[in-house]
Amino acid sequence: MAIQTTRLSDPAVRAFVTAVNNHDREAFSAVLAPGATMADDGSERDLADWTDREIFSSNGHMDVEKEVNGGRSLVVSYRNDTWGEMRTRWSFTVDDGRISRFETGQA
C-alpha cells in the first residue's frame, strides 16, 4: 500500500517526490541545495544528467511504500519509460530545508 505523498514526514522529501511525480523541473530544482550531489547504486552521478535521463525525459514516478529515519529514507516502487517498474531505496540528506544529497538504488 503506497503512502500518500502529502503524508510524507519530511517537508523537503515530500517536495522532492511531489516534483518528480508532477514532472516539475522548477519545483525539483527549488528543493535542491546549491551544489547538491547524488549517487545511483553506489556510483556518483552527474545530478543534472541523471535526473534528466532517469526522471524528466522518461516520465519517472515514485510510489512510496515505506519511510524510515524521519522520512529521509524511502522504499519506493519507481517506474519510468526506460526501465519499467522496480523497487528502489532512496536516502536524503537535508540541510536547512533543502536536499543536499540523495542516494538511490535497487531495494
Image (tube, rainbow, N blue to C red):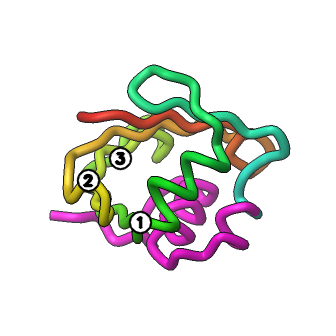
Q: Which residues are magenta?
A: 1-29
What amino acid is found at the position of numbered circle 1 in the picture?
Answer: Ser
What amino acid is found at the position of numbered circle 3 in the picture?
Answer: Glu
Report the residue that reaches farthest toward the left: 1
In which quadrant of the rendered image does the C terminus lie? Answer: top left
Which numbered tag is attached to residue 58? 1
In which quadrant of the rendered image does the N terminus lie? Answer: bottom left
What amino acid is found at the position of numbered circle 2 in the picture?
Answer: Trp
The residue that mark 3 highlights is: 67
Q: CA distance from mark 2 to mark 1?
A: 9 Å
Spot occupied by residue 56 in the image (x, y as percentages of width and height): 52, 66
Spot occupied by residue 21 in the image (x, y as percentages of width and height): 45, 72
Q: Is residue 28 magenta?
A: yes
Q: CA distance from mark 3 to mark 2?
A: 23 Å
Q: Is residue 99 magenta?
A: no
Few, some or many residues within 10 Å of mark 1 (<14, 14–19, 20+): some
Q: Which residue is drawn at the image coordinates 42% and 36% (left, top)?
A: 104
Mark before the other along the chain sequence, 3 or 2: 3
Label 3: which secondary element: strand
Q: Which residue is drawn at the image coordinates 46% and 47% (left, top)?
A: 71
The residue that mark 2 highlights is: 83
Q: Quadrant of residue 19?
A: bottom right
Direction from residue 54 to residue 32 in the image, left or right: right
Report the residue that reaches farthest toward the right: 34
- Circle nearer the viewer, 3 or 2: 2
Q: CA distance from mark 3 to mark 1?
A: 25 Å
